[in-house]
Image (tube, rainbow, N blue to C red):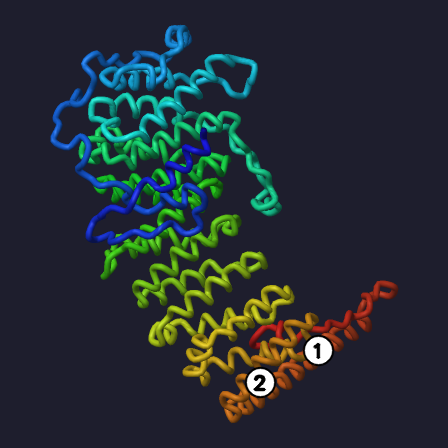
């Protein structure tokens, strides 16, 4: 039945209009399955269903049961004492009353970690939840204003719960791709509740102006807390549902963005652990894609204060793909943002984490391909100073990824325009790689880049090579002078020291010219 229910869901909700500022939303990148099909913002026409009604009881059945005062063990026995009839077995006039009764019955929670406990009640709840989803999918007029309170009550009772304790991970040795995710034993039931919530959000019967009394800010905050679930299936549903809420409930849009910001701040500056950062960034990627131009200062501040600091945590690999997409969306919309983005990227550039540096180099290439010449000129010196360090890296993936930047025609054109300033920075790294790098692939790529510079401006290349050779000779002479001074000091120590306490032989230090400190005497 779940398979048929998924098929119904996949083609049910079309795009809707959004705020003029936000523009038309696209699908969130990276979404898959039924969630991917329903990630477009909007999903239903607003103002339908219960519009024009007033009062909390509008559209409610006349004999609507009241909300349970307490979901206790005793009330659970009362609700599950007898099975409720199917919707097919009651006349149309009584279906909404039965709808509410089933909502109240399904609001009770059970312990799914113990498979032998409440077996009958769990199966009854599963059957009734499936009937609720099927009933919601058959025609309109189901989600009236009068039953919205009962719908949200049932959903909240099932979803909003304490998550299990977070497993401790070694920040240096933890690999999210190799680690097995922790799956919630209650997921077969939770999945049906999430499907029902999705049907409620996208339904034409659900009027945002009315439903906002129940899908309020507190509801949104509790949904955001669930993004820390270790079960990826739950996070995928949450991603879809929160995006739908953002699209339909325009009044909540600023609050949702601010609440996501706060999640990021806590993750960056306090915990450095959160399971749902990638999913939240996927939602934001679609939201950013719809920002109107010129960009508001609020959005630029979000880029500088929340998105760029997300490059800092060690576990950035878990969400880097989504983060890079969000950042490039900003630069694509406003090319002037390339300068602060590149400076922030250099600020958080890793020093000892080679895998993280490879990710940064990939993101750097994407940003440079969107950077205009004036912005490039402002950051090219510190940028290529760092790039020359990456070219010298003994980690072959870092050096190789750095050299791949010259595969981009656009980046080559940027460098060609500023070759007089950039070639003296890059050439020492190229010369050292061609002379002594241990990896054959890096050596071959280096030779290709050298040849490109030579063909670009042979006279400039020869001049830079001459200066490099002179500097190298001066460095060798400085090192030789230093070794001679140490030899004199060693001889003096041997000659004037007490007998039998002569220091060991002076060790010979072989210092690479590229690694020697600047300003040697």
Q: What element carries label 1?
A: helix
| Residue 223 image position (x, y, % from top left) | 36, 34
Q: Mark 2 points at which residue?
A: 451
Give the label on residue 409, or none. none
Q: Residue at x 26, y 53 (%)?
A: 24
| Residue 51 image position (x, y, % from top left) | 15, 32
In the image, residue 452 sits, relative to residue 54, either above or below, namely below
Q: Residue at x 36, y 66 (%)?
A: 338
Q: Mark 1 points at which residue?
A: 485
Residue with the most extreme bottom position: 459
| Residue 503 image position (x, y, % from top left) | 81, 66
Quadrant, the N terminus: top left
- Going from N to C along the chain, the mark reached first, 2 or 1, is 2
User: Where on the picture, by quarter, is residue 519?
Assistant: bottom right
In the image shown, does 109 or 493 lie closer to the viewer?
A: 109
Q: Which residue is drawn at 51% across and 20% down?
A: 112
- Specify whether 47 is left or right of 490: left
Q: Is mark 2 on a helix, strand or loop?
A: helix
| Residue 518 image position (x, y, % from top left) | 56, 75
- Specify whether 92 is left or right of 242: left
The local crowd at label 1, few if under 14, some if 14 to 19, many if 20 or more residues have their Cα within 10 Å, is: few
In the image shown, does 21 or 478 lie closer to the viewer?
A: 21
């Amino acid at each position: 039945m779940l398979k048929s229910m998924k098929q119904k869901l996949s083609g049910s909700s079309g795009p809707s209009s959004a705020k003029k500022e936000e523009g038309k939303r696209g699908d969130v990148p990276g979404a898959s399955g039924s969630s991917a099909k329903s990630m477009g913002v909007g999903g239903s026409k607003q103002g339908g269903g219960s519009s024009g009604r007033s009062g909390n009881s509008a559209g409610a059945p006349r004999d609507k049961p009241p909300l349970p005062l307490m979901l206790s063990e005793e009330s659970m026995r009362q609700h599950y004492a007898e099975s409720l009839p199917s919707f097919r077995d009651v006349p149309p006039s009584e279906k909404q009353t039965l709808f509410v009764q089933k909502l109240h019955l399904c609001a009770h929670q059970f312990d799914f970690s113990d498979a032998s406990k409440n077996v009958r009640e769990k199966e009854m709840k599963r059957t009734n939840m499936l009937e609720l989803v099927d009933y919601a999918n058959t025609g309109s007029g189901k989600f009236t204003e009068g039953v919205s309170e009962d719908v949200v009550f049932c959903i909240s009772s099932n979803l909003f719960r304490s998550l299990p304790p977070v497993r401790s991970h070694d920040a240096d040795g933890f690999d999210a791709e190799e680690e097995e995710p922790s799956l919630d034993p209650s997921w077969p039931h939770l999945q049906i509740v999430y499907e029902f919530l999705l049907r409620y959000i996208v339904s034409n019967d659900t009027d945002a102006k009315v439903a906002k009394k129940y899908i309020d800010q507190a509801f949104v905050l509790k949904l955001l807390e669930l993004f820390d679930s270790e079960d990826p299936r739950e996070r995928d549903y949450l991603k879809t549902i929160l995006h739908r809420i953002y699209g339909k409930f325009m009044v909540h849009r600023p609050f949702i963005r601010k609440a996501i910001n706060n999640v990021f701040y806590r993750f960056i500056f306090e915990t450095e652990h959160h399971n749902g950062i990638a999913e939240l960034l996927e939602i934001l990627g679609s939201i950013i894609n719809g920002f109107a131009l010129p960009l508001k200062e609020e959005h630029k501040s979000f880029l500088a204060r929340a998105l760029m600091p997300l490059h800092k945590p060690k576990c950035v690999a878990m969400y880097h793909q989504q983060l890079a997409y969000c950042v490039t969306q900003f630069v694509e919309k406003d090319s002037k943002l390339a300068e602060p983005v590149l400076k922030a990227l250099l600020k958080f550039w890793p020093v000892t984490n080679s895998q993280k540096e490879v990710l940064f180099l990939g993101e750097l290439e994407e940003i440079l391909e969107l950077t205009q010449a004036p912005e490039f000129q402002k950051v090219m010196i510190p940028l290529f100073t760092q790039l020359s360090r990456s070219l010298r890296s003994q980690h072959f993936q870092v050096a190789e990824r750095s050299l791949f930047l010259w595969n981009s025609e656009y980046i080559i054109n940027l460098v060609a325009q500023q070759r007089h300033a950039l070639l003296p920075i890059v050439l020492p790294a190229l010369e050292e790689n061609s002379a002594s790098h241990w990896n054959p692939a890096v050596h071959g790529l280096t030779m290709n880049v050298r040849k490109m510079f030579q063909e670009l401006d042979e006279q400039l290349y020869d001049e830079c090579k001459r200066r490099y050779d002179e500097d190298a000779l001066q460095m060798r002479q400085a090192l030789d002078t230093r070794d001679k001074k140490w030899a004199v000091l060693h001889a003096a120590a041997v000659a004037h020291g007490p007998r039998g306490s002569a220091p060991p032989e002076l060790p010979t230090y072989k210092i690479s010219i590229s690694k020697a400190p600047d300003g040697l005497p």
